[in-house]
Image (spheres, grey):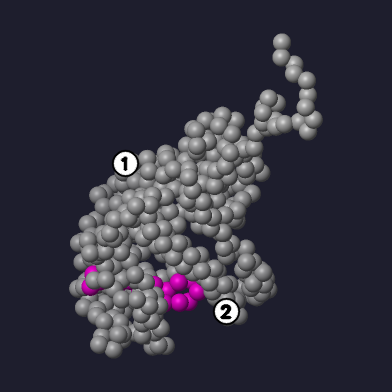
Amino acid sequence: MQLRYSFRLYPSAGQRTALARAFGCARVVYNDALRARETARSKGLPYPKIGDLSKTLITEAKKTPERAWLGEVSAVALQQSLRDLDTAYKNLFDGLKGKRLRMGAPRYKSRKDTRQAVRFTANARWSITPGQKLRLPKIGDVKVKWSRTLPSSPSTVTVVKDRAGRYFASFVVKSGSQEVLPRTTPELGIDLGLGHFAVLSDGTKIDSPRFLRRAEKRLRKAQRALSRKEKGSKNRNKARVRVARAHARVADARGEFHHQLSTQLIRENQAVAVEDLAVKALARTRLAKSVHDAGWSAFVSMLEYKAARYGRTFVKIGRFEPTSQVCSVCGAKDGPKPLHVREWTCGACGAVLDRDINAAVNVAKAAGLAVTACGAQVRRAPAPAPRSEAGTHPTPQPSTAR
């Protein structure tokens, strides 16, 4: 499988100028190609091929005074911009055919976009120098903060500038069978929530960090400062960057939490099961901010690809499974319960069940995993003794036998 590793870049002032030039040239070629295809569509003509677009919009355009500055950047980056447009159209048509989720039509890119990217393949002859710097064509040797080693030689590198003004190098590498972990015994069901981020079928409860809620005061202050700045001014742009950096810190902390937890669960368990939550529907309720703050979709995606990477089993059960209505001990179903009911007693077997742990056990059972309720903190409800077995009376009583 293909993996993507991102590392922070620290370009110099001249390199930032060169990268801005590369971002701009790639954006212009993308927009020119999109305009050419939309013109052909409006006239009822077939879409021009990527080879024809490359010849017209790159090779021949460099010879004209209006587009001569395209020669100042790597031609490979411009070619990849055309391939990005081709991929966007393919996703659009596959969505219309039902082969994937529906995607919107490609849109023109703006120089005011807060995120810019340019991609280099092996044909661009980029490399990692002996001094551990990233050598990019017509940009130079850029300093990289290496946080870990790459598992294999990367095939492509994408340089990204995010809305906070930070630069990243994103490498695409292939993962082989050497990363498959040895088999283990435990199998786990996970119930995701808001009170606790995750409740495991073995009884473990993982608190929700609530990164956005904890940073709301700082974000509110930065946003108020931005709203007071005059539009179009340099001070407003500086305030915008401060807001973006504050949000980036929250997103980075949430992503780090997701990565650490998902890696731990995948390494320690042979199989993991989760419930397919309707995140989009929940995000339209009064719990929207908390739902987005939890980031369930990103966490589940990490579990899925890490399970495939390390040779584990990942199962996603349907969202309509009555995991909170069924007793994990006897299987009796006694209907839905209000959210404030966190503990309930089964009317069939008398077991006292924790709502979240019971749901996690049922998630694992619905996925066909070999999990029991022994670790689910299940206990029998106290039952009154029959009158005939209530013990001895302090004073003897006359017999009432007939």
Label 1, label 2: how many angstroms apart (C-alpha)?
Answer: 45 Å
Q: Which residues are magenta?
A: 153-167
Task: State the residue in front, 333 or 8.
Answer: 333
* Total tally of numbered discs in the picture: 2
Q: Look at mark 2 in the image and give the residue it sits on.
A: 238
Q: Secondary structure at mark 2?
A: helix
Give the quadrant of residue 24: bottom left
Whether 341 is drawn above or below 50: the answer is above
| Residue type at numbered disc 1 | Lys
Q: Residue at x 62, y 66 (%)?
A: 214
Picture layout, residue 240 above or below residue 96: below
The residue located at (26%, 52%) in the rendering is 47
> Is 156 a magenta residue?
yes
Position of the C terminus by quadrant: top right
- State yes or no: residue 37 in magenta: no
Q: Which sits in the foreground, 392 or 158?
A: 392
Image position of 207 (left or right of 32):
right
Bin the neighbour count of mark 1 within 10 Å (Cα to Cα): few under 14, some 14-19, many 20 and up.
Answer: few
On screen, residue 90 above or below 180: above
- Pick the front one: 211 or 33: 211
In the rendered image, which residue does mark 1 sit on? 97
Q: Name the disc covering residue 186, or none.
A: none
Q: Residues within 10 Å of mark 2 (few under 14, many from 20)?
A: few
Asked if the residue under mark 2 is in contact with the one under mark 1, i.e. CB atoms within 8 Å, the reply is no
| Residue drawn at the location 31% of the way across and 85% of the way down | 133
